[in-house]
Each structure stands twice: as structure tokens, then as C-alpha cells.
Amino acid sequence: MNLEFPYSEIETPSPSPNPRMDARTVKEEEESSSNGGRRRGRRYWRCTKNDFFPETSFENITTYKSALSQTFPRLKNRLLARSSDANELVVLQKESERPMQKCLTWWDLIWLSFGSVVGSGIFVITGQEAHDDAGPSIVLSYAISGASALLSVFCYTEFAVEIPVAGGSFSYLRVELGDFIAYIAAGNILLEAIVGAAGLGRSWSSYLASMINTDNPDLLRFRVDSFAEGFNLLDPVAFFILLVANGIAMSGTKRTSWLNWIASIVTALVIVFIIVVGFIHAKSSNLVPFFPMGVQGTFKAAAVVYWSYTGFDMVATMAEETKQPSRDIPIGLIGSMSIITVIYCLMALALTMMVNYTQIDVNAAYSVAFVQIGMNWAKYLVSLCALKGMTTSLLVGSLGQARYTTQIARAHMIPPWFALVHPKTETPINATLLVAILSAIISFFSSLDVLSSVFSFSTLLIFMLVAVALLVRRYYVKDVTPRSHLVKFLVCLFIIIASSIAISAIWNSDGRGWIGYAIAGIMLFSGTVGMALLPQQHVPKIWGVPLVPWLPSLSIGINLFLVGSLGYIAFLRFVICSAAMLVYYFFVGLHATYDVAHLNQEESNNLESS
């Protein structure tokens, strides 16, 4: 059941020896329990079969065959299984053998959020979407996405305060929606991390090329005609910058945060310059027509530019390294995202008033825009700012992606070797290397337009699931919520999700009649009202989302609407990726998590009862 005390005020105990370690390992750990009581653990750089597959199902071919024969009973068990706050906070952290250093404050989180978000969107995707889909209405696209992102920030903040672990949304979903849903989310989180970093690396390369030759953003790439379109421009610069950024992230959390906030302050000053100069050279005629591709183009762009707000979820994974999560996380997340939304809208408006949307460069929008208004020197300042912004996004992304991966590995959904924390840097180097190498390889081959739609789908899906998880947390506590209330809650939740999907489907089928929208809207409102009339079973002790269930319900509706605006190709790519994830799950992940869950159940229960 969900615990009723604020975890953010608890000092996490030192992990006990892993029960899967052999006798020699336990002896080594006991002998090394010195240095002020901190357990140093085993040698970090090791690579044995037991480090990757320590579970009983993978001891030998016989045990593996036996495990495969139990696939369906085990799947049933994991479909119904939920983790607990205690399990995520204490039990799973044993897998890292060493704790991460608590070194971050609200000041660090504000600038980590700013550094992660500003640069990964406004300098990357604005030009593409303004030119291809939204025109001047890209301003509204950013406002819509910003409002939706802020709703998701509220949901993340409540979870991060009560469950301050490295897993972020993965841990939240595992506690409230169960192991299987969390695995699907984990796969999408890794996909989001890898694809997002790869896309950012490609954009970094484009901006650098535009500084050398404005007319050729592919200057630093090599074309291979025998490869498929979208995968035929090889990018060694993107490959290299991703490895450098992840190398810095591996060196230490506080050092990376310090470098980030210094660079972010410089970026903020240049952004002020861009906005001021943009409005000085603004032409109101460039705003006509405001909706060149119709309102649908605006919403389609909103779904894609959601990419520009995704950095905050990376910052949420830093909760385990935050000194006072109950104070620092709400200030850092909500404060920074409110400011960033305003900045994005002003920058998008400045761009579309400076240059007609048909003349916007899709690869390096802002630097080329200054050339078009006769300020050739300013393009270098803007391009340097863009490179700084994208570099800090890569730095913070490297931190957050590794923390996601660490918690996923702690749960044994991927090998626990990736959960290990290095004794000197106090960072998860193995997890960082996994994301760094994969994203660098993908960035070497894949173009930005191929990457952005896949990234947006995964992000929107996870944000929607976190809002659902928050409603579950508030209205359902195992062994406490009466069955009749649970049934009513599930009916209301189904109505909210179904009506949100209906509104998106009507919109994307070119439906223009008001009857369908009215019926779906009334259903959404009725489902939310019905849920509001139910008693909440869990009340947050420190910080909670206001206006529950209204804000989470609205978040679900907006995220599903934006998902429906992405188009057929994005759905197809998502289905293909999910199918590959399920293959791995049925043959590996299911059996590993089943074994670990049974080993950890007794310890988790003891922690909850205490």
C-alpha cells in the first residue's frame, strides 16, 4: 500500500548487501566497510555473467527453459503487480552498491531546467514547424504545448517530492500503474533519451555548419546515396559532441551543474537580445496569414514542439541528488517552466515577425533570420548562443537520461550492471555510456525530421501516463479503497481517456460538426465531475497538485489530443519500437523482474510495516 509519510524528509539508509552476491563478495564488502561508515563495495570496472544476469532464471539453460515455460503465469503476476514507495526509495538502491551524492539545491534545479529546455526546442524545431505547419501561429503552438507541459510539471512535482529517486516517471508509474505499464514506459523513456539526444546532436552540427556557410547546413555531413532517404547524411560532428557531453556528465553531478548555470546565464542574456532586436525589426505584415495551414497545422506543430519542453522530466530524475526535495523541487520545476513558456512564446513571435514564415531556414532559423534583416554579425552571436543552449541541453540530458537508465536497471528490466554508481565520481557511468553510445550512433545516420516525430510520441505518452498515475495515487490505495469506490473511479477514468481519444479522432478525421465535439466534451466533463465526487484516499503531506482531478484530467486530454496530431508515420514507428520492446520483455525482462520481485518483497513489506 502507499505510505502515508513524506519520504522527502527521511534520510535513506545505507543499502545492505545484495542477496544475489556470492559469499566472497559479501566478505569483501564487510571488510571494506570503513571510511566513516560508507560501504565502498566491489571493484567498479567488472564484467561477469553475474553482473548482467544474476537472476535465478538465467543461472543455466535448464533454469531458463523452465522460466520460459512459465511465461504466461509470470506475465499475469507482473501485470497485476505494483511496486511501493519503500521499494523504489530504499530496496532498489541496493543495486547501485553506492549512493549518489546529495549536492543539488533549488538554484541548481532552476538552471538545470533552463539549460536542459532552452536550446533543445526553440533553437532546434521552431524553424521547421513554422515553415512547414504553423506559420506565424507557431506562437500559439508554443502556448498550447507550454500549458500542457506545465500541467505535467505539476504531476511530476508531486511525485518527485514524495518519491525522490532517480527513476522519475518510471518509478512513479511502477508504483501506481504496475510493472508492465512501467516497462512500456521504460522502453519509451530509453527511446526518448536516445532519440532526443541524437536529434539534438544533429541540430548542433547544423548550427555549426551554418556559421561556416549559411547556404549549406549539411556542410559537415557526408552523403551516401546507397542509404535510404533520411538516413543517408552521415554526421561525425553530432557523434563527437554527444560523446564529449556525456563524458562531462560522467565526471560529476555538481561540476556539470556548475558549468550548466554559467553557460545558461550567458544564453539568457543573448535571448533577451534576440527578442529585443526581433521586435525592433518586426513587420506586422509577416503575421498574415496567421494560420496558413489552418488551425490543424497549429495543433500539429504544437505536438512536435512539445519536444522543446521535455527537459523538465530530466530534472525530475535529479531528486535523489537534491538536498531538500520538498522545498527545492517545486521551486526549481514549476518556477523555471513558467518562465520558459513565456520566453518561448516571445522568441517564436520575434522570429515570425522578423522573417516571413516561407523564408525561415528550417535548420538554423534564428541565425539565418538575422542575415535576412541585414545583421550579418549577429548570426554568429545567435549561432554561438544556440550552440551553448544545445550544449547545456546535452549536458543536462546526459545527467537525466543516465538516472532514468539507472533506476530501470535497478529494477532489472535491463541488466543491473547499468545501475552501478562509480565510487569516485558518484555518478552512474555505465548507464551514461549506454545512452551515449546508442545516441551517438543514431545521430550519425538519422536526420532531424525522422527523429522528432518518434521523440514527441514517446514523450506525450509518458506525460499522459504520469497524469493517470497521479489520479490513481490520489483515489486508490490498496486494501484501503472500498471496492465500490474503485469501480466508480475506474469507470470515470475510462470515460476521461475515451472521451479525450474521441475528441482527437474527430479532429484528425477532419470533422467539423459541433455535435461530436459536444458529446465528447460532455463525457470528459462528466467523467471528471464523477471522479471529483469520490473521496480521495491519499493526501500529499508536503506538496500536492491543486484542483485534482481537474488539472490531471485536462493534462490527459491535451496530451492525447497532441498525440493524435502527430500523424500516421509517428504511430507506425511507435508500434514497431513497442513490438521490439515486447520481444525483449517476454524473453528477458519479464523473468528478471519476476525473480527480483520475489526476493525484494519481504524486505519491502518490512519497510512499509515499520
Image (cartoon, rainbow, N blue to C red):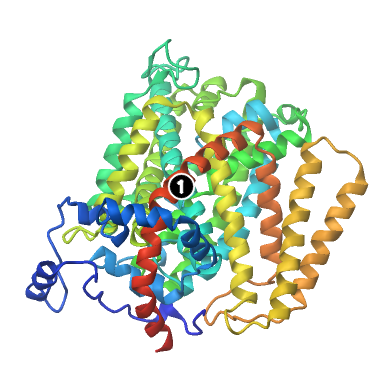
**Image side of residue 237 versus residue 510, left or right:** left
Q: Amino acid at mark 1?
A: Ala
Q: Disc 1 on helix, strand or loop?
A: helix
Whether residue 332 is visible, yes or no, is yes
When the figure is inspected, residue 217 is found, relative to residue 120, above or below; the finding is above
Q: Position of residue 552 (x, y in %)?
A: 66, 64
Q: Position of residue 326 (x, y in %)?
A: 46, 75
Residue nearest the viewer, comparing 257 with 593: 593
When the figure is inspected, residue 313 is found, relative to residue 474, above or below; the finding is above
Q: Which residue is under mark 1?
A: 268
Q: Residue at point 60% right, 50% down?
A: 342
When the figure is inspected, residue 443 is found, relative to residue 416, above or below; the finding is above
**Image side of residue 28 versus residue 255, left or right:** left
Residue nearest the viewer, comparing 43 with 339: 43
Q: Position of residue 333 (x, y in %)?
A: 50, 62
Whether residue 258 is visible, yes or no, is no
Residue 292's quadrant in the figure?
A: top right
